[in-house]
Amino acid sequence: MSKSDKVLIFDTTLRDGEQAPGASMNQDEKLEIAFALERLGVDIIEAGFPVISDGDFASVKNVARNIKNSSVCGLARSIKKDIDAAHEALKVAKRPRIHVFLATSKIHLEHKLKKTEDEILKMAVDAVKYARDRVEDVEFSPEDASRSEKKFLYQILESVIDAGATTVNIPDTVGYSVPAEYGQLILDIKNNVPNINKAIISVHCHDDLGVAVANSLAAVKNGARQVECTVNGIGERAGNASMEEVVMAIRTRSDFYGCSTGINTKEIYKTSRLVSKLTGFVVPPNKAIVGANAFRHESGIHQDGILKERSTYEIIRGEDVGFTGTGLVLGKHSGRHAFKVRLKSLGMELPDDQVDKAFERFKALADKKKDVFDEDLIAIIEDEVKTVKPTWTLVDLITKSGMNVTPEVKLILESNGKTYEKVSSGDGPVEACYRAIDSIVNVKGELLDYSIQSVTRGKDALGEVTIKAKIQDKIVISHGASTDIIVASAKAYLNAINKILI
Ligand code: KIV
Ligand code: ZN
Protein backbone atom coordinates (compact mmCIF):
# COMPACT_ATOMS: atom_id res chain seq x y z
CA MET A 1 0.00 0.00 0.00
CA SER A 2 1.22 3.51 -0.77
CA LYS A 3 1.63 6.33 1.74
CA SER A 4 -1.74 7.75 0.72
CA ASP A 5 -3.34 4.50 1.86
CA LYS A 6 -2.23 4.98 5.43
CA VAL A 7 -4.94 6.13 7.81
CA LEU A 8 -3.50 8.17 10.66
CA ILE A 9 -4.85 7.42 14.12
CA PHE A 10 -5.40 10.54 16.20
CA ASP A 11 -6.18 9.49 19.73
CA THR A 12 -8.14 11.92 21.86
CA THR A 13 -8.67 9.73 24.96
CA LEU A 14 -6.81 12.29 27.06
CA ARG A 15 -8.86 15.23 25.76
CA ASP A 16 -12.34 14.34 24.42
CA GLY A 17 -12.22 11.01 26.31
CA GLU A 18 -11.56 12.84 29.54
CA GLN A 19 -14.62 15.01 28.84
CA ALA A 20 -16.77 11.93 29.57
CA PRO A 21 -18.61 12.75 32.80
CA GLY A 22 -16.64 11.24 35.67
CA ALA A 23 -13.57 10.26 33.64
CA SER A 24 -11.08 12.79 34.93
CA MET A 25 -7.53 11.52 35.39
CA ASN A 26 -4.55 12.96 37.20
CA GLN A 27 -1.26 13.91 35.58
CA ASP A 28 0.52 10.61 36.31
CA GLU A 29 -2.42 8.60 35.03
CA LYS A 30 -2.50 10.65 31.82
CA LEU A 31 1.19 10.05 31.26
CA GLU A 32 0.72 6.32 31.83
CA ILE A 33 -1.98 6.32 29.15
CA ALA A 34 0.18 8.43 26.82
CA PHE A 35 2.99 5.84 27.09
CA ALA A 36 0.49 3.08 26.33
CA LEU A 37 -0.73 5.03 23.28
CA GLU A 38 2.85 5.48 22.11
CA ARG A 39 3.46 1.71 22.42
CA LEU A 40 0.25 1.18 20.49
CA GLY A 41 1.74 3.31 17.72
CA VAL A 42 -0.89 6.06 17.49
CA ASP A 43 0.24 8.81 15.15
CA ILE A 44 -1.07 11.76 17.16
CA ILE A 45 -1.93 11.98 20.86
CA GLU A 46 -4.28 14.83 21.74
CA ALA A 47 -3.08 15.37 25.29
CA GLY A 48 -5.52 18.04 26.46
CA PHE A 49 -6.82 21.59 26.21
CA PRO A 50 -3.99 23.61 27.81
CA VAL A 51 -5.83 26.91 28.36
CA ILE A 52 -8.66 25.26 30.27
CA SER A 53 -6.83 24.83 33.60
CA ASP A 54 -3.37 24.78 35.14
CA GLY A 55 -3.76 21.03 35.55
CA ASP A 56 -4.52 20.52 31.86
CA PHE A 57 -1.61 22.75 30.88
CA ALA A 58 0.77 20.79 33.12
CA SER A 59 -0.36 17.41 31.85
CA VAL A 60 -0.07 18.42 28.17
CA LYS A 61 3.44 19.64 28.94
CA ASN A 62 4.25 16.44 30.80
CA VAL A 63 3.07 14.30 27.87
CA ALA A 64 4.88 16.58 25.40
CA ARG A 65 8.13 16.20 27.34
CA ASN A 66 7.99 12.41 27.54
CA ILE A 67 6.52 11.19 24.27
CA LYS A 68 8.96 10.83 21.40
CA ASN A 69 7.38 8.67 18.71
CA SER A 70 3.90 10.15 18.38
CA SER A 71 3.00 13.77 17.65
CA VAL A 72 1.57 15.51 20.70
CA CYS A 73 -1.35 17.83 20.16
CA GLY A 74 -3.04 20.52 22.24
CA LEU A 75 -6.50 21.92 21.60
CA ALA A 76 -7.22 25.65 21.31
CA ARG A 77 -10.19 27.83 20.48
CA SER A 78 -9.52 30.25 17.62
CA ILE A 79 -8.19 32.91 19.95
CA LYS A 80 -4.63 34.00 20.68
CA LYS A 81 -4.77 33.25 24.42
CA ASP A 82 -5.62 29.59 23.71
CA ILE A 83 -3.07 29.20 20.95
CA ASP A 84 -0.37 30.76 23.14
CA ALA A 85 -1.18 28.32 25.96
CA ALA A 86 -1.10 25.34 23.58
CA HIS A 87 2.17 26.56 22.07
CA GLU A 88 3.75 27.05 25.49
CA ALA A 89 2.68 23.59 26.71
CA LEU A 90 3.93 21.95 23.50
CA LYS A 91 7.28 23.76 23.24
CA VAL A 92 9.10 20.74 24.63
CA ALA A 93 7.43 18.28 22.22
CA LYS A 94 9.45 16.57 19.55
CA ARG A 95 6.50 16.77 17.15
CA PRO A 96 4.01 19.41 18.32
CA ARG A 97 0.60 19.97 16.76
CA ILE A 98 -1.83 22.78 17.56
CA HIS A 99 -5.48 21.95 16.96
CA VAL A 100 -7.67 25.05 16.58
CA PHE A 101 -11.43 24.89 16.33
CA LEU A 102 -14.31 27.23 15.65
CA ALA A 103 -17.98 26.44 15.11
CA THR A 104 -19.38 26.88 11.61
CA SER A 105 -23.02 25.76 11.81
CA LYS A 106 -25.84 28.32 11.72
CA ILE A 107 -27.11 27.10 15.10
CA HIS A 108 -23.75 27.75 16.74
CA LEU A 109 -23.16 31.05 14.93
CA GLU A 110 -26.55 32.49 15.89
CA HIS A 111 -26.96 31.17 19.42
CA LYS A 112 -23.49 30.51 20.80
CA LEU A 113 -21.03 32.78 19.04
CA LYS A 114 -23.41 35.52 17.81
CA LYS A 115 -21.19 36.18 14.81
CA THR A 116 -21.64 36.39 11.05
CA GLU A 117 -20.07 33.95 8.60
CA ASP A 118 -17.59 36.65 7.49
CA GLU A 119 -16.47 37.20 11.07
CA ILE A 120 -16.05 33.47 11.61
CA LEU A 121 -14.06 33.10 8.40
CA LYS A 122 -11.66 35.84 9.46
CA MET A 123 -11.25 34.44 12.99
CA ALA A 124 -10.47 30.98 11.62
CA VAL A 125 -7.91 32.23 9.10
CA ASP A 126 -6.23 34.51 11.66
CA ALA A 127 -6.08 31.67 14.20
CA VAL A 128 -4.56 29.20 11.75
CA LYS A 129 -1.95 31.76 10.63
CA TYR A 130 -1.15 32.61 14.24
CA ALA A 131 -0.72 28.92 15.12
CA ARG A 132 1.23 28.21 11.94
CA ASP A 133 3.70 30.99 12.85
CA ARG A 134 4.46 28.93 15.95
CA VAL A 135 4.37 25.28 14.83
CA GLU A 136 4.59 23.47 11.50
CA ASP A 137 1.69 21.16 12.16
CA VAL A 138 -1.72 22.85 12.50
CA GLU A 139 -5.12 21.20 12.46
CA PHE A 140 -8.34 23.12 12.00
CA SER A 141 -11.79 21.85 13.04
CA PRO A 142 -14.98 23.58 11.93
CA GLU A 143 -17.01 22.50 14.97
CA ASP A 144 -20.44 21.04 14.14
CA ALA A 145 -19.26 20.63 10.53
CA SER A 146 -21.85 17.97 9.75
CA ARG A 147 -24.68 20.46 10.45
CA SER A 148 -22.99 23.39 8.70
CA GLU A 149 -24.09 24.86 5.35
CA LYS A 150 -21.94 23.05 2.79
CA LYS A 151 -21.09 26.16 0.82
CA PHE A 152 -19.73 27.90 3.90
CA LEU A 153 -17.92 24.75 5.00
CA TYR A 154 -16.09 24.47 1.63
CA GLN A 155 -15.20 28.16 1.79
CA ILE A 156 -13.75 28.02 5.30
CA LEU A 157 -11.82 24.81 4.57
CA GLU A 158 -10.27 26.33 1.47
CA SER A 159 -9.31 29.48 3.40
CA VAL A 160 -7.74 27.69 6.38
CA ILE A 161 -5.73 25.44 4.07
CA ASP A 162 -4.45 28.57 2.28
CA ALA A 163 -3.62 29.97 5.72
CA GLY A 164 -1.46 26.92 6.48
CA ALA A 165 -3.67 24.22 8.04
CA THR A 166 -2.05 20.84 7.39
CA THR A 167 -5.05 18.80 8.54
CA VAL A 168 -8.72 19.72 8.27
CA ASN A 169 -11.01 17.84 10.59
CA ILE A 170 -14.74 17.37 9.98
CA PRO A 171 -16.40 16.92 13.36
CA ASP A 172 -19.81 15.37 13.74
CA THR A 173 -19.88 17.19 17.06
CA VAL A 174 -23.36 16.19 18.18
CA GLY A 175 -23.38 12.71 16.63
CA TYR A 176 -26.19 13.70 14.23
CA SER A 177 -24.90 12.33 10.97
CA VAL A 178 -25.48 8.84 9.57
CA PRO A 179 -22.97 6.76 7.56
CA ALA A 180 -24.07 7.25 3.93
CA GLU A 181 -24.58 10.97 4.48
CA TYR A 182 -21.29 11.47 6.33
CA GLY A 183 -19.34 9.50 3.71
CA GLN A 184 -20.95 11.67 1.03
CA LEU A 185 -19.92 14.81 2.94
CA ILE A 186 -16.27 13.73 2.78
CA LEU A 187 -16.59 13.03 -0.94
CA ASP A 188 -18.26 16.42 -1.49
CA ILE A 189 -15.43 18.14 0.39
CA LYS A 190 -12.90 16.37 -1.84
CA ASN A 191 -14.78 17.49 -4.94
CA ASN A 192 -15.55 21.06 -3.91
CA VAL A 193 -12.55 22.36 -1.97
CA PRO A 194 -10.02 23.17 -4.70
CA ASN A 195 -6.87 22.97 -2.53
CA ILE A 196 -7.97 19.94 -0.47
CA ASN A 197 -5.00 17.88 -1.68
CA LYS A 198 -2.71 20.13 0.36
CA ALA A 199 -4.24 18.88 3.63
CA ILE A 200 -5.20 15.62 5.23
CA ILE A 201 -8.93 15.12 5.76
CA SER A 202 -9.67 14.00 9.29
CA VAL A 203 -12.91 12.82 10.86
CA HIS A 204 -14.17 13.11 14.41
CA CYS A 205 -17.45 11.37 15.19
CA HIS A 206 -19.56 11.22 18.32
CA ASP A 207 -21.72 8.25 19.17
CA ASP A 208 -25.09 9.80 20.06
CA LEU A 209 -26.85 7.61 17.49
CA GLY A 210 -24.49 4.67 18.00
CA VAL A 211 -22.86 5.13 14.57
CA ALA A 212 -19.59 6.93 15.36
CA VAL A 213 -17.45 4.02 14.14
CA ALA A 214 -19.67 3.41 11.09
CA ASN A 215 -19.47 7.12 10.20
CA SER A 216 -15.69 7.13 10.57
CA LEU A 217 -15.37 4.07 8.34
CA ALA A 218 -17.70 5.56 5.72
CA ALA A 219 -15.44 8.61 5.74
CA VAL A 220 -12.31 6.47 5.29
CA LYS A 221 -13.96 4.72 2.35
CA ASN A 222 -14.49 8.16 0.80
CA GLY A 223 -10.97 9.46 1.30
CA ALA A 224 -10.51 10.57 4.92
CA ARG A 225 -6.96 9.74 6.03
CA GLN A 226 -7.06 10.57 9.71
CA VAL A 227 -9.54 9.19 12.24
CA GLU A 228 -9.99 10.80 15.65
CA CYS A 229 -11.01 8.27 18.24
CA THR A 230 -10.66 7.16 21.85
CA VAL A 231 -9.76 3.94 23.63
CA ASN A 232 -12.98 2.06 24.57
CA GLY A 233 -14.93 4.84 22.78
CA ILE A 234 -15.07 7.03 25.89
CA GLY A 235 -15.83 10.71 25.40
CA GLU A 236 -18.29 13.57 25.70
CA ARG A 237 -21.90 12.29 26.20
CA ALA A 238 -22.25 8.93 24.40
CA GLY A 239 -18.55 9.00 23.55
CA ASN A 240 -16.35 9.08 20.47
CA ALA A 241 -15.56 6.51 17.80
CA SER A 242 -13.80 3.62 19.49
CA MET A 243 -10.15 3.35 18.46
CA GLU A 244 -10.01 -0.44 18.67
CA GLU A 245 -13.12 -0.88 16.51
CA VAL A 246 -11.95 1.55 13.82
CA VAL A 247 -8.46 0.00 13.70
CA MET A 248 -9.64 -3.60 13.61
CA ALA A 249 -12.32 -2.87 10.99
CA ILE A 250 -9.73 -1.26 8.71
CA ARG A 251 -7.36 -4.18 9.30
CA THR A 252 -9.86 -7.01 9.04
CA ARG A 253 -11.57 -5.51 5.98
CA SER A 254 -8.51 -4.13 4.21
CA ASP A 255 -9.94 -5.90 1.13
CA PHE A 256 -12.81 -3.38 1.26
CA TYR A 257 -11.15 -0.24 2.59
CA GLY A 258 -7.83 -0.67 0.74
CA CYS A 259 -5.85 1.06 3.47
CA SER A 260 -4.08 0.40 6.75
CA THR A 261 -3.08 2.00 10.05
CA GLY A 262 0.28 1.91 11.81
CA ILE A 263 -1.23 0.48 15.01
CA ASN A 264 0.47 -2.39 16.81
CA THR A 265 -2.81 -4.21 17.41
CA LYS A 266 -1.27 -6.58 19.98
CA GLU A 267 -1.22 -3.65 22.42
CA ILE A 268 -4.97 -3.01 22.10
CA TYR A 269 -6.31 -5.21 24.89
CA LYS A 270 -3.76 -4.03 27.45
CA THR A 271 -4.41 -0.38 26.61
CA SER A 272 -8.15 -0.90 26.89
CA ARG A 273 -7.72 -2.44 30.38
CA LEU A 274 -5.50 0.42 31.45
CA VAL A 275 -7.99 3.09 30.34
CA SER A 276 -10.83 1.20 32.00
CA LYS A 277 -8.83 0.89 35.22
CA LEU A 278 -7.84 4.56 35.35
CA THR A 279 -11.20 6.03 34.36
CA GLY A 280 -13.30 3.51 36.29
CA PHE A 281 -15.39 2.89 33.15
CA VAL A 282 -15.99 -0.83 33.03
CA VAL A 283 -15.87 -2.37 29.52
CA PRO A 284 -19.14 -4.24 28.85
CA PRO A 285 -18.61 -7.97 28.16
CA ASN A 286 -20.22 -7.73 24.72
CA LYS A 287 -18.09 -4.75 23.60
CA ALA A 288 -16.56 -5.40 20.17
CA ILE A 289 -12.80 -6.21 20.16
CA VAL A 290 -12.08 -5.69 23.87
CA GLY A 291 -15.14 -7.08 25.70
CA ALA A 292 -14.57 -10.21 27.80
CA ASN A 293 -16.88 -12.19 25.48
CA ALA A 294 -15.43 -10.88 22.20
CA PHE A 295 -13.48 -14.10 21.59
CA ARG A 296 -15.59 -16.61 23.51
CA HIS A 297 -17.70 -19.17 21.71
CA GLU A 298 -20.64 -20.53 23.66
CA SER A 299 -22.77 -22.37 21.13
CA GLY A 300 -21.88 -26.04 20.63
CA ILE A 301 -22.19 -25.65 16.85
CA HIS A 302 -19.76 -22.73 16.90
CA GLN A 303 -17.31 -24.56 19.17
CA ASP A 304 -17.39 -27.55 16.87
CA GLY A 305 -16.79 -25.31 13.84
CA ILE A 306 -13.88 -23.53 15.55
CA LEU A 307 -12.22 -26.82 16.42
CA LYS A 308 -12.49 -27.95 12.79
CA GLU A 309 -11.41 -24.66 11.25
CA ARG A 310 -10.99 -21.45 13.21
CA SER A 311 -12.17 -19.15 10.41
CA THR A 312 -15.64 -20.74 10.42
CA TYR A 313 -16.72 -18.51 13.29
CA GLU A 314 -13.77 -16.21 13.97
CA ILE A 315 -12.83 -13.13 11.94
CA ILE A 316 -10.20 -11.84 14.38
CA ARG A 317 -7.91 -13.93 16.57
CA GLY A 318 -7.78 -12.85 20.21
CA GLU A 319 -3.97 -12.89 20.02
CA ASP A 320 -4.10 -10.21 17.30
CA VAL A 321 -5.35 -7.68 19.84
CA GLY A 322 -3.27 -9.05 22.69
CA PHE A 323 -6.19 -10.92 24.26
CA THR A 324 -4.50 -13.87 25.85
CA GLY A 325 -7.66 -15.87 26.22
CA THR A 326 -9.07 -17.83 29.10
CA GLY A 327 -6.81 -20.85 28.84
CA LEU A 328 -5.90 -22.51 32.13
CA VAL A 329 -2.46 -21.16 32.84
CA LEU A 330 -1.23 -22.07 36.28
CA GLY A 331 -2.31 -24.21 39.18
CA LYS A 332 -1.41 -24.45 42.85
CA HIS A 333 1.60 -26.60 42.04
CA SER A 334 3.12 -24.05 39.68
CA GLY A 335 6.42 -22.61 40.80
CA ARG A 336 7.68 -19.05 40.96
CA HIS A 337 9.60 -19.43 37.71
CA ALA A 338 6.56 -20.56 35.72
CA PHE A 339 4.58 -17.72 37.30
CA LYS A 340 7.20 -15.15 36.30
CA VAL A 341 7.38 -16.50 32.73
CA ARG A 342 3.58 -16.31 32.47
CA LEU A 343 3.56 -12.70 33.70
CA LYS A 344 6.19 -11.85 31.11
CA SER A 345 4.11 -13.35 28.33
CA LEU A 346 1.22 -11.15 29.52
CA GLY A 347 3.47 -8.14 29.10
CA MET A 348 4.01 -7.65 32.84
CA GLU A 349 7.66 -7.62 33.81
CA LEU A 350 8.01 -6.71 37.45
CA PRO A 351 10.88 -6.22 39.87
CA ASP A 352 11.60 -9.27 42.05
CA ASP A 353 10.03 -7.94 45.25
CA GLN A 354 6.77 -7.28 43.41
CA VAL A 355 6.88 -10.72 41.78
CA ASP A 356 7.21 -12.20 45.29
CA LYS A 357 4.16 -10.32 46.55
CA ALA A 358 2.11 -11.22 43.51
CA PHE A 359 3.25 -14.85 43.72
CA GLU A 360 2.10 -15.10 47.36
CA ARG A 361 -1.25 -13.73 46.30
CA PHE A 362 -1.45 -16.17 43.39
CA LYS A 363 -0.73 -19.11 45.71
CA ALA A 364 -3.49 -18.00 48.07
CA LEU A 365 -5.88 -17.70 45.14
CA ALA A 366 -4.89 -21.07 43.69
CA ASP A 367 -5.73 -22.65 47.06
CA LYS A 368 -9.25 -21.22 46.96
CA LYS A 369 -9.99 -21.34 43.28
CA LYS A 370 -9.92 -24.44 41.11
CA ASP A 371 -8.77 -22.82 37.87
CA VAL A 372 -6.52 -19.77 37.62
CA PHE A 373 -6.84 -17.88 34.34
CA ASP A 374 -4.81 -15.11 32.72
CA GLU A 375 -7.51 -12.61 33.70
CA ASP A 376 -7.07 -13.62 37.34
CA LEU A 377 -3.34 -12.95 37.09
CA ILE A 378 -3.95 -9.54 35.51
CA ALA A 379 -6.43 -8.68 38.29
CA ILE A 380 -3.97 -9.79 40.98
CA ILE A 381 -1.23 -7.64 39.52
CA GLU A 382 -3.51 -4.63 39.14
CA ASP A 383 -4.78 -5.09 42.68
CA GLU A 384 -1.62 -6.08 44.48
CA VAL A 385 1.32 -4.41 42.88
CA LYS A 386 1.59 -0.83 44.03
CA THR A 387 4.37 1.49 43.04
CA VAL A 388 4.09 3.26 46.40
CA LYS A 389 3.89 1.52 49.77
CA PRO A 390 0.29 1.80 51.02
CA THR A 391 -0.37 3.67 54.26
CA TRP A 392 -3.17 1.30 55.33
CA THR A 393 -3.47 -2.42 54.65
CA LEU A 394 -6.26 -4.84 55.34
CA VAL A 395 -5.33 -7.52 57.89
CA ASP A 396 -8.68 -9.22 58.48
CA LEU A 397 -12.36 -8.82 57.85
CA ILE A 398 -15.21 -10.81 59.38
CA THR A 399 -18.76 -10.13 58.25
CA LYS A 400 -22.16 -11.08 59.58
CA SER A 401 -25.07 -10.46 57.24
CA GLY A 402 -28.33 -12.04 56.15
CA MET A 403 -31.98 -11.32 55.49
CA ASN A 404 -33.03 -10.90 59.09
CA VAL A 405 -29.93 -9.56 60.84
CA THR A 406 -28.32 -6.14 60.91
CA PRO A 407 -25.14 -6.47 58.85
CA GLU A 408 -22.04 -6.14 60.98
CA VAL A 409 -18.34 -6.10 60.17
CA LYS A 410 -15.26 -6.61 62.34
CA LEU A 411 -12.31 -5.07 60.59
CA ILE A 412 -8.59 -5.07 61.36
CA LEU A 413 -6.24 -2.65 59.57
CA GLU A 414 -2.51 -2.14 59.84
CA SER A 415 -0.50 1.05 59.50
CA ASN A 416 3.13 1.66 60.41
CA GLY A 417 3.40 -1.66 62.23
CA LYS A 418 0.34 -1.06 64.47
CA THR A 419 -3.01 -2.82 64.12
CA TYR A 420 -6.40 -1.21 64.63
CA GLU A 421 -9.72 -2.96 65.12
CA LYS A 422 -13.30 -1.75 64.75
CA VAL A 423 -16.76 -3.30 64.70
CA SER A 424 -19.41 -1.40 62.68
CA SER A 425 -22.90 -2.01 61.36
CA GLY A 426 -24.73 -0.61 58.33
CA ASP A 427 -27.61 -1.13 55.93
CA GLY A 428 -25.46 -3.69 54.13
CA PRO A 429 -22.07 -5.30 54.76
CA VAL A 430 -20.31 -2.91 52.34
CA GLU A 431 -21.64 0.11 54.20
CA ALA A 432 -20.70 -1.45 57.54
CA CYS A 433 -17.23 -2.12 56.24
CA TYR A 434 -16.77 1.43 54.87
CA ARG A 435 -17.96 2.88 58.18
CA ALA A 436 -15.38 0.82 60.05
CA ILE A 437 -12.63 2.01 57.69
CA ASP A 438 -13.73 5.68 58.02
CA SER A 439 -13.67 5.35 61.77
CA ILE A 440 -10.19 3.76 61.99
CA VAL A 441 -8.55 5.99 59.38
CA ASN A 442 -10.46 9.03 60.59
CA VAL A 443 -11.72 10.21 57.20
CA LYS A 444 -15.22 10.88 55.92
CA GLY A 445 -15.53 9.31 52.51
CA GLU A 446 -18.48 9.58 50.17
CA LEU A 447 -19.11 6.72 47.76
CA LEU A 448 -20.09 8.19 44.38
CA ASP A 449 -20.11 5.04 42.30
CA TYR A 450 -19.69 1.33 42.91
CA SER A 451 -19.60 -1.57 40.47
CA ILE A 452 -18.60 -5.19 40.66
CA GLN A 453 -17.57 -7.53 37.90
CA SER A 454 -16.44 -11.10 37.94
CA VAL A 455 -12.97 -11.43 36.43
CA THR A 456 -13.64 -14.88 34.96
CA ARG A 457 -16.58 -17.23 35.00
CA GLY A 458 -17.61 -19.70 37.68
CA LYS A 459 -18.85 -19.42 41.26
CA ASP A 460 -15.27 -19.28 42.53
CA ALA A 461 -14.33 -16.35 40.26
CA LEU A 462 -12.44 -13.33 41.52
CA GLY A 463 -14.73 -10.34 42.01
CA GLU A 464 -13.31 -7.00 40.95
CA VAL A 465 -14.84 -3.97 42.63
CA THR A 466 -14.43 -0.52 41.07
CA ILE A 467 -15.39 2.52 43.09
CA LYS A 468 -15.41 6.24 42.70
CA ALA A 469 -15.21 8.02 46.03
CA LYS A 470 -14.90 11.55 47.33
CA ILE A 471 -12.39 11.68 50.15
CA GLN A 472 -11.11 14.93 51.66
CA ASP A 473 -12.70 16.82 48.75
CA LYS A 474 -10.79 14.81 46.15
CA ILE A 475 -12.43 12.39 43.74
CA VAL A 476 -10.61 9.14 43.24
CA ILE A 477 -11.22 5.93 41.30
CA SER A 478 -9.85 2.67 42.60
CA HIS A 479 -10.18 -1.10 42.48
CA GLY A 480 -9.95 -4.15 44.67
CA ALA A 481 -10.10 -7.84 43.82
CA SER A 482 -10.82 -10.93 45.89
CA THR A 483 -12.88 -14.10 45.74
CA ASP A 484 -14.88 -12.50 48.61
CA ILE A 485 -16.74 -9.44 47.32
CA ILE A 486 -16.84 -7.68 50.70
CA VAL A 487 -13.06 -8.06 50.98
CA ALA A 488 -12.77 -6.74 47.38
CA SER A 489 -14.98 -3.77 48.38
CA ALA A 490 -12.84 -3.06 51.45
CA LYS A 491 -9.65 -3.23 49.37
CA ALA A 492 -11.06 -0.86 46.74
CA TYR A 493 -11.95 1.68 49.43
CA LEU A 494 -8.61 1.34 51.21
CA ASN A 495 -6.83 1.77 47.87
CA ALA A 496 -8.78 4.99 47.36
CA ILE A 497 -7.76 6.24 50.80
CA ASN A 498 -4.13 5.28 50.23
CA LYS A 499 -4.11 7.13 46.92
CA ILE A 500 -5.39 10.28 48.63
CA LEU A 501 -3.00 10.01 51.56
CA ILE A 502 -0.02 9.51 49.27
O1 KIV B 1 -16.67 17.19 18.90
C1 KIV B 1 -16.03 18.18 18.50
O2 KIV B 1 -16.47 18.95 17.66
C2 KIV B 1 -14.72 18.40 19.09
C3 KIV B 1 -13.86 19.43 18.43
C4 KIV B 1 -13.11 20.25 19.39
C5 KIV B 1 -12.98 18.76 17.42
O3 KIV B 1 -14.33 17.71 20.01
ZN1 ZN C 1 -15.52 15.82 20.12
Image (cartoon, helix red, strand yellow):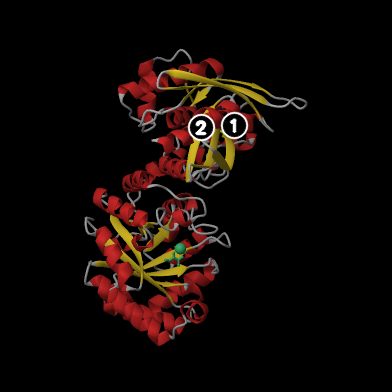
Instruction: State whether residue 400 is above or below residue 255.
Output: above
Pointer 2 residue Cβ closer than 8 Å to ligand 2? no
In terms of image quadrants, where is residue 203?
Answer: bottom left
Pointer 1: what residue? 435
Label 2: how many Cα within 10 Å (few below 14, some 14–19, many 20+): few
Please state the horizontal and vertical placement of residue 2, each as a whole percent of the image: 29, 60
At label 2, which amino acid type do we have? Asn
The residue under the point 47% across, 80% down is 109
- Mark linked to residue 408: none
Please state the horizontal and vertical placement of residue 450, each as a whole percent of the image: 58, 40
Pointer 2: what residue? 442
Question: Can see residue 229?
Answer: yes
Instruction: State whether residue 138 is above or below residue 293.
Output: below
At label 1, which amino acid type do we have? Arg
Please state the horizontal and vertical placement of residue 366, each as a whole percent of the image: 51, 18
Please state the horizontal and vertical placement of residue 104, each as a whole percent of the image: 44, 78
Q: Tag 1 or tag 2, which sits nearer the N-term?
A: 1
